[in-house]
Amino acid sequence: MSDTPGARLQTLFDGHRLTPTQRRIAHWMVRRAADVPFLSSVELAELAGVSQPSVTRFAVALGFDGYPALRRHLREVAPAEPGRPAGDGAAEGPPANEYQQAVHAEIENLRHLAELLADPAPVERAGALLAASRPLPVLGLRAAAAQARGFAYFAAKVHPDVRLLDEGGSMLTDRVDAAVRAGATALLCFALPRHPREVVEALEYARGAGLAVVTVADSAFAPVAGHSDVLLPAAVGTALAFDTACAPMLLGRALLEAMCDGLPDAQARLEEFDAGAAARGLFVE
């Protein structure tokens, strides 16, 4: 794991059974790892959208006497990066409007993703699992359906059998069963807020059926975490009325790249597709 403030915070939370509210606090602490050692409990509560007593209970759940003790510990293990300004990384100047603030927040999400990818091992492991699965089911419901569909579209150009699961209901477990019967060994899931209950249930079912589950989620503390063999976190933007998902999309493309490394005929398949597309005049050049 990379030695960044966010990674060190993640290590602090590992092994603790956290409530949904506590997972939300932990999620925001990781996102703002450079700032959080200097935040008061009230400021952290406002950032995470929880009550101040919830922050205190969270600190106690981690084994500290209270939030001041947790903050002292954070200043030792996750100090701010030298020369890096606090906040969302926006350049100095006139106050940003709400749209600019949303962009700056996404830039911060991408910066944090870059820090996590300093250790490529989890993505490489996930790519190998997906490349070896025949067929490869790709699950994403509701807000995550677009991410799953985009991944499946590109993956089908290099993987011989990709099966998109983007509709819930009683047929979902049937389709997981069909993939297992056909020889699937792994399932990829995109899980974004708000997390549908049937996604959690589907992952639990898939693991019970013998599939290794790789999940791209908005947080390492997402409800799907306990049902994933490899969890790859990428935060969503929350500055606008509807969440934005630049980081999960980019992480999905990185995962595609890692999967291609495990498919020896990936380049040949791409060249074959390009030749066919040119012959059919599919694209306007």
Image (cartoon, rainbow, N blue to C red):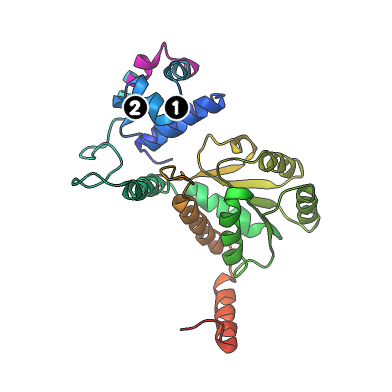
Q: Can you say which quadrant of the picture contains the N terminus?
A: top left
| Residue 66, magenta (yes or no) | yes
Give percent across and percent down for residue 132: 65, 58
Q: Residue at x 49, y 48 (%)?
A: 121
| Residue 167, magenta (yes or no) | no
Name which quarter of the figure residue 136 lies in.
Answer: bottom right
Q: Which residue is mark 1?
A: 12
Name which quarter of the figure residue 8 lies in.
Answer: top left
150 is higher (above) or lower (below) than 210: below
Q: Residue at x 64, y 49 (%)?
A: 141
31 is higher (above) or lower (below) than 119: above
Identified by mark 1, the residue type is Leu
Name which quarter of the figure residue 175 lies in.
Answer: bottom right
Give percent across and percent down for residue 56: 43, 16
The magenta-colored residue range is: 60-71
Q: Callout 2: helix, strand or loop? A: helix
Identified by mark 2, the residue type is Val
Q: Which residue is mark 2?
A: 77
Q: Is residue 147 left or right of residue 186?
A: left
